[in-house]
Amino acid sequence: MVDYADIAAAYEVLRPVVKQTPLERSKTFSEMTEADLYLKLENLQTTGSFKLRGAYNKIHRLNNEEKRRGVICASAGNHAQGVAHAATLLDVSSTVYMPRYAPPTKIIATRSYGAEVILEGETYDDAHEAAVGHAERDGLTFVPAFNDPDVIAGQGTIGIEMHRALQDIDVVLVPVGGGGLISGVAVALKHLQPDVTVIGVEAEGAQAMYRSLQQGEPTPLTSMSTIADGIAVKHPGMLTFEHVRRYVDDMITVTDEEIARTLYMLMQRAKLVVEPAGAAGLAAVLCGTVSYPSENIVALLSGGNINLLLLTQTIERGMMQHDLLSRFAVTVPDRPHMLGRILDTLAELNVNVQSISHDRMTTSVPIGHVKIIVTFQTLGAEQISQVERALRERELPYERLQ
Amino acid sequence: MVDYADIAAAYEVLRPVVKQTPLERSKTFSEMTEADLYLKLENLQTTGSFKLRGAYNKIHRLNNEEKRRGVICASAGNHAQGVAHAATLLDVSSTVYMPRYAPPTKIIATRSYGAEVILEGETYDDAHEAAVGHAERDGLTFVPAFNDPDVIAGQGTIGIEMHRALQDIDVVLVPVGGGGLISGVAVALKHLQPDVTVIGVEAEGAQAMYRSLQQGEPTPLTSMSTIADGIAVKHPGMLTFEHVRRYVDDMITVTDEEIARTLYMLMQRAKLVVEPAGAAGLAAVLCGTVSYPSENIVALLSGGNINLLLLTQTIERGMMQHDLLSRFAVTVPDRPHMLGRILDTLAELNVNVQSISHDRMTTSVPIGHVKIIVTFQTLGAEQISQVERALRERELPYERLQ
């Protein structure tokens, strides 16, 4: 088991290399949760996630011969970038296996940090197997993503930083995939402040750790489904399982919908880009899975490496949910002035049209009619009601789309 | 003129109220600029911008009778939120005039901070005139957006914070609209570190301060055009003009295109949401308008209140420019298997299709043919060349769209 001394040693190793990321109180989120809510901005870490810490601590501790031979790992995500950058900083060569369908931006980033990227297999498991084979063949050191004491100790340095920034943390919410991050953070914080409550948060579609705790042993999932790719882990580790069982107070889950809403609020209110996995902890308290009124809560935002196209989708959905964007289908006779009438109605209410499309083919539209779909920006629910009233008054049959 | 003592006094007033925002070194941007580049994250300030500082300092210094009567301002942007929140914190009532077409999110946010929002007139000037009339009529204190010593002193506290976080700043890049921010920051920093170079950055389409310096007096612009609404100011103030003339080393400009590219890089690499005006300073050094090799540069990111739909557009354009998203028009006979052939070609190259549309009507397409527009994600320029080669080999005539 990892103990506090391991993490304190890692802290000294990492101090000159990694960012001591800010711990910021959020006024908006504090009001929403009726608590004092702080965000640990590990999304601002070099490489865009906490993974650099564990990887650097692990590679730093290798002997010279091991360093000379180089390191290898399998990852489609943040661990890849962490290993690549840590190895380059330590002048060690690195090889990263990714499945063939890894996101382009992750491949590019990992290469830019200095690793040789090899695309192999359809799934992470395929890539992992190939990497292990390659490691044995060439005598390279395999850097595990979580199930390793040096990696856990590296991630635990976040706990020390949190405590330095805020001495009386009541609750800390940590995203859980393989469990390396929460293992380290829990060991560090429980040592520094034994009365702290450590909550692990998994995606509903990938709750390997929760299931494993129920079963009393690490239990692999047969399938997973979540947008939070950074915490979609099938096989929890034995070592992280033991740490979680011993140090973590509770494991809870959040849905993809809750994560997406949280990503939107993080951009809109906190001005931060966070990846789905990184927002799981905050989602649990913002969306009401758990509630700690008047307490000092720290939500660990573990990473920011999101596919930016997913971000655009999140923004549009978020605006729709907050009634800032609205979509109506108006069915009218297919005649020249009808579109103008709809647009005039909206213009009078000071509503800004975003896009328009015509549908003449759907069988729900009477022949000779057209369904005009208008997307527009609004001030909120009240203005949407005004639009509905105005369309009714002008006898323009409409349907609000979600 | 504002002096350092005014700013030091404002610093004590603001310390318990505003965030001491982080100053973070960016590894990526440092490498891109061959310098040590730090970001002052004022986009993480409460209300999403630095405007809270000046407004709070101004309202705090009013006498009890003035506070009892309340404050008023005109703004379509961050100043509105700053005044509303500062007034509420000080238990003072506030009224904000905005032009009728102010962005919905700004109206909502200003109301949520406790102000009464009045929409009046077509332009900012109209709203301003109405607010001044209202102030005189009801004996309210008008809070200027920049041309006021207490406001300037409040904004200057950012200079003190920067110096506390980093003692040897060589160059600081500050977005300039009315000039309140740069006036305060320049006075503070030049006092604390006389050899610092302070550069003001305006949008190319709104360079009122540069023109005024050339003319030797505050000179209003007749027209403006920029996406950086936060620094689109027609009438520079007399007071800020004098401060800029005396304390600022140089004024430069950036284009909207450069600002948009910078917003994209801030999201993609730094995981930060910044508004166009807030990114102007960083844009100047990232896009090569100025260059300070090996120096300690601080770019002040002054705000984060961006219309999120503009953000989605910025992401898509940014990905297009970085060859991560690509659009081809392929003209083929209008027959069933043609679309499949195009998609197979892309799938073989491991390219992820984002959207498809058909155009049969443009006159550039021979009759009986269809132009299929495919948007897809790629790994970069090299993979786009592979796509072009594959389309040529299959004799599918294409055109790359920008």
Image (cartoon, coloured by chain):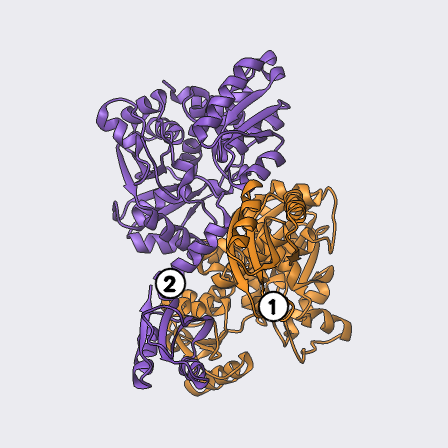
Chain colours: A purple, B orange
Q: Is residue A351 left or right of residue B281?
A: left
Q: Position of residue B145 (x, y in %)?
A: 54, 71
Q: CA distance from mark 1 to mark 2?
A: 40 Å
Please say whether residue B300 is visible from this viewpoint: no
Q: Position of residue B186 (x, y in %)?
A: 65, 58
Label 2 sits on what residue type? Met
Q: Residue at x 54, y 81 (%)?
A: B123
Q: Is residue A64 left or right of residue B70?
A: right
Which quadrant of the structure image shows residue B344?
top right
Q: Position of residue B289 (x, y in %)?
A: 73, 56
Have a look at marks 1 and 2 and say if they share a chain.
Answer: no
Q: Is residue B144 left or right of residue A209?
A: right
Label 1 sits on what residue type? Ile
Residue that mark 2 sits on = A320
Label 2 resides on the chain identified as A
Which quadrant of the structure image shows residue A181?
top left
Front in this rendered view, residue B226 or A300? B226
Please say whether residue A327 is visible from this viewpoint: yes
**Mark on residue B367?**
1
Front in this rendered view, residue A271 or A34? A271
Q: Residue at x 35, y 42 (%)?
A: A281
